[in-house]
Amino acid sequence: MQYKTYKAAIFDMDGTVLNTLEDLTSALNHVLAETGHDHDYGIAQVRQFFGSGVQVAITRALAIEKGIASYEQLEYVGQDGDTITPRVDAQEVRRIQDIFRPYYAAHCAIQTGEYAGISPLLRQLRAAGIQTAVVSNKPDPAVQKLTADYFQGLFDLALGEQPQIRRKPAPDMVLKALKDSGLTPEQAVYIGDSEIDIQTAENAGLDCLSVTWGFRSKTFLQNHGARFLVDTPEEIAAFF
């Protein structure tokens, strides 16, 4: 991995710069209750649902409810070769998703909080001339709101899930961020907390830093191909 040659740091949002689990849990349970589904999921369970976007999270919740999948199988939902998603009612997933998006956008900053040390890290990077961006599978309206609420002026670019662009781990979102920033993959590093982030970086041709304070454990990340692990935001600065 390169050191001190990057011109940009591209961050994931959930589990990387913001701890969003409590608001995600509350919103998901609220919407599942409203649509007549099991709705008593705890933070540890919802942690396993998210990472690949809202559609996959809802699919995972319904797969658990219907007994189609175990928690150990959830990481494969939404991935290549997935045999679980076709057994979940796609129309019902869309119905729940259409209710979740506006509800979460209006309730995404109630219990959410920045991980300690993130804002100082962003200021340090920007002071050194490093461009900063956040690229997330979270719906774009929520990404824009949370970026403005918690990191005003600290990200040059913020990009969330949009209908016209494939979500991570496809490289499209990261490549769009690079294009908009006038950079190549070799000039940036991707920073995230999950296996999806590792795959995204690989697919886009970027180096990847995996943070250990997010939605996945250090052991899980190591078992899913993480090459460079960081335990604190301060450690990230050493790579620039």
Image: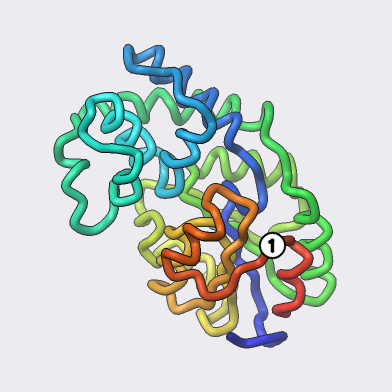
Q: Kindly identify the residue that appears in the image at 69 percent across and 70 percent down.
A: 131
Colour convention: rainbow
Q: In which quadrant of the rendered view does residue 196 lie?
A: bottom left
Q: Please state the total of marks drawn on the protein image.
A: 1
Left or right of 207 on screen, residue 131: right
The picture places residue 103, in percent across and down from the top left corner, at 50, 23
The picture places residue 205, in percent across and down from the top left corner, at 44, 78
Q: Which of the two residues, 100 or 72, is positioned nearer the viewer here? A: 72
Q: Quadrant of the N terminus?
A: bottom right
- Numbered disc 1: secondary structure: loop
Q: Kindly identify the residue that appears in the image at 43 percent across and 65 percent down.
A: 223
Q: In which quadrant of the rendered view does residue 144 lie?
A: top right
Is residue 78 shown above or below 98?
Answer: below
The picture places residue 180, in percent across and down from the top left corner, at 55, 68
The picture places residue 30, in percent across and down from the top left corner, at 47, 17
Q: Residue farthest to the front?
A: 219
Is residue 119 shown above or below 53?
Answer: below
Q: Kindly identify the residue that appears in the image at 45 percent across and 18 percent down.
A: 40
Q: Kindly identify the residue that appears in the image at 83 percent across and 59 percent down.
A: 120
Q: In which quadrant of the rendered view does residue 20 lie?
A: top right
| Identity, as a three-letter code, of the amino acid under mark 1 | Asp
Is residue 176 visible in the rendered structure shown here? no
Q: Which of the two residues, 168 or 77, is positioned nearer the viewer here? A: 77
Left or right of 74 on screen, residue 4: right
* Dot 1 alpha-carbon crowd within 10 angstroms: few under 14, some 14 to 19, many 20 or more: few
Is residue 170 visible in the rendered structure shown here? yes
Q: Quadrant of the C terminus?
A: bottom right
Q: Which of the two residues, 199 or 150, is positioned nearer the viewer here? A: 199
- Residue that mark 1 sits on: 231
